[in-house]
Amino acid sequence: MAVVSDEPETTDGRGGPIPTLDPEAHIVVVDDDSETQQLVVKFLRQNGYRVTGAPTYRELQETLERSTVDLIILDIMLPGRSGLDICRDVRSKSTVPIIMVTAKGEEADRVVGLEIGADDYLAKPISPRELLARIRAVLRRAATAPQQALPKSTSVVGFAGWRLDTRRRELTSPDGVIIDLSGAEFELLLAFVEHPQRVLSRDQLLDLARNRTASALDRSIDVHVSRLRRKMSHHRDAGALIKTVRGAGYVFVPSVARLT
């Protein structure tokens, strides 16, 4: 992908200032061209975003597993696995928004990309102003869209090596140890895995976990999150699964895959 300029945009094209961006938005730029990737990363950082560069699918996967990602900018022309294959794989596990970058005039690639789950596309060369506009539009849609839960038919889901059998209500660690969960802890974990990589307020968690009688200001969610973390803390990487977002709630960090 190519950016015409790496200078930050400061006006809206009519002389007015561009609105301040959300400094918490985290974007991953997937491009194997190191020079181009660095330009895009620098440009987006100058415009207020947290940005991670990922030259390969493996590094994208590692980033998705260890941190919250709000948007992926994915070049379609990558060595090994194409951007279309990567888009399809990411979409099967996560609802994170994806903007595909395609060669100019490659309408077929754009159509396929949108059909397999991309949220938008850009044709090369990329205009900085258009890049920012598309990012903002996709993030706005993602913020207001209702989150899709896992299908009712889903029985077993996986995340970061863990397995949750939703029918047997059984959680298994990466080491094969079955973790004993209370009913409230199971419902809370289920709410997290059904809405991964999204900040959920205490009010939303209370509703999703079917604890509708509790007040939105009730600290019981904090207690259950603490207990869930403690039960999972004896196993590797457990501490990074549920992240506290100060003043907002919690986010379930890893991507979730349907296993059966």
Image (cartoon, rainbow, N blue to C red):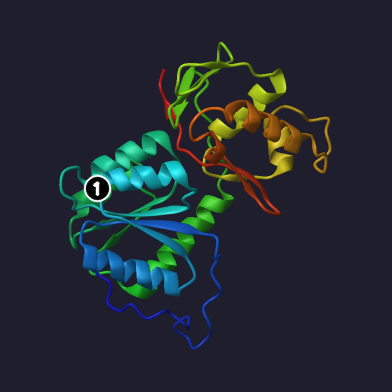
Residue drawn at point x = 72 percent, y = 42 percent: 202
**Residue 116 position in % (x across, y down):** 32, 40
Label 1 SS? helix
Q: Nearer the viewer, residue 136 or 240?
A: 240
Label 1 crowding class (10 Å Cα cut-off): few <14, some 14-19, many 20+?
A: many
**Residue 41 position in % (x across, y down):** 35, 66
Q: Where is 18 relative to 160, above or below?
A: below
Q: Where is 135 relative to 178, above or below?
A: below
Give the residue type at disc 1.
Gly
**Residue farthest toward the bottom in the current orientation of the protein:** 15
Q: Where is 191 relative to 250, above or below?
A: above
**Residue farthest toward the front in the current orientation of the protein:** 234
Q: Nearer the viewer, residue 171 or 101?
A: 171
Q: Is residue 198 visible?
A: yes
Residue drawn at point x = 56 percent, y = 11 percent: 168
State the image quarter where residue 228 is shown.
top right
Q: Quadrant of the C terminus?
A: top left
Query: Does 5 sit left or right of 233 as displayed?
Result: left
Q: Quadrant of the N terminus?
A: bottom left
Query: Does 219 sit left or right of 167 as displayed?
Result: right
**Residue 69 position in % (x across, y down):** 46, 50
Query: Does 93 sit left or right of 113 as displayed?
Result: right
Q: Is residue 124 visible?
A: no
Residue drawn at point x = 67 percent, y = 32 percent: 208
Q: Nearer the viewer, residue 185 or 6?
A: 185
Check disc 1 and report the residue beneath it: 83
**Residue 31 position in % (x across, y down):** 25, 57
Residue drawn at point x = 69 percent, y = 18 percent: 182
Query: Does 225 sit left or right of 41 as displayed?
Result: right
Q: How many marks?
A: 1
